[in-house]
Amino acid sequence: MLQSNYTSRMLADVLNNMLETEAENRTYNNPAVNIAERKEDYIIEIAAPGLSKEQFKVELNKDSLIIYAEEMNNDGQNYIKREFNFGNFRKIYHVPEKVNREKITAKYADGIFTITLPKREEAIDRGPVQIAIS
């Protein structure tokens, strides 16, 4: 069991490193992100409550997926205490070759910005195939 958890964490780290490229710019926030690989696609979920979908921009540039949100106007509020903000963020991810770039989609609902990266048909694992023996 312990080995299985260790292996799962290692696999998750490898997948994250494969997809994510860190942007070294301290003016950006660093929202929480979930990345999952499913049989037919990859899913990137970014926790971004309080934003509107118009504030997000998504670009595909060669093999990089660039996701960013523009800063909200705080209407001149003078905060007494501030533990979160809706400022700028930028995430850059490497897009693997097996992704169908023309079918990438994005949506924003309930404070979660979700990008779906479908795999190309030939990259989807269909499981074992029985070979007839003659």
Image: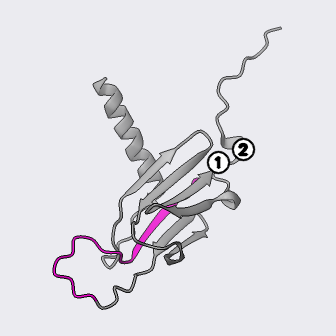
Spatial distance from mark 1 to mark 2, Cα to Cα?
6 Å
Q: Is residue 5 left or right of residue 115?
A: left
25 to 98, vertically: above or below: below
Q: Is residue 21 left or right of residue 101?
A: left
Is 134 inside the magenta-drawn segment? no
Instruction: Indicate the secondary structure of the residue bearing disc 2.
Output: helix
Place of residue 48 in the rendered image (x, y in percent of width and height, measured from the top left): 40, 66
Q: Could you tell me which quadrant the C terminus lies in?
A: top right
Residue in the picture at 71% in, 22% down:
129
Which residue matches tag 2? 121
Place of residue 12 in the rendered image (x, y in percent of width and height, measured from the top left): 40, 43
Q: Is residue 4 left or right of residue 93?
A: left
Query: Which mark, residue 119?
Result: 1
> Given the image, on which type of amino acid does mark 1 rest?
Lys
Instruction: Indicate the secondary structure of the residue bearing disc 1.
Output: loop
Which is more toward the observer, 58 or 107? Answer: 107
| Main SS class of the magenta portion in the image | loop
> Given the image, on which type of amino acid does mark 2 rest?
Glu
Name the colour scheme: one colour
Q: Range of the magenta residues?
A: 77-98
Which is more toward the observer, 85 or 77? Answer: 77
Place of residue 10 in the rendered image (x, y in percent of width and height, measured from the top left): 36, 39
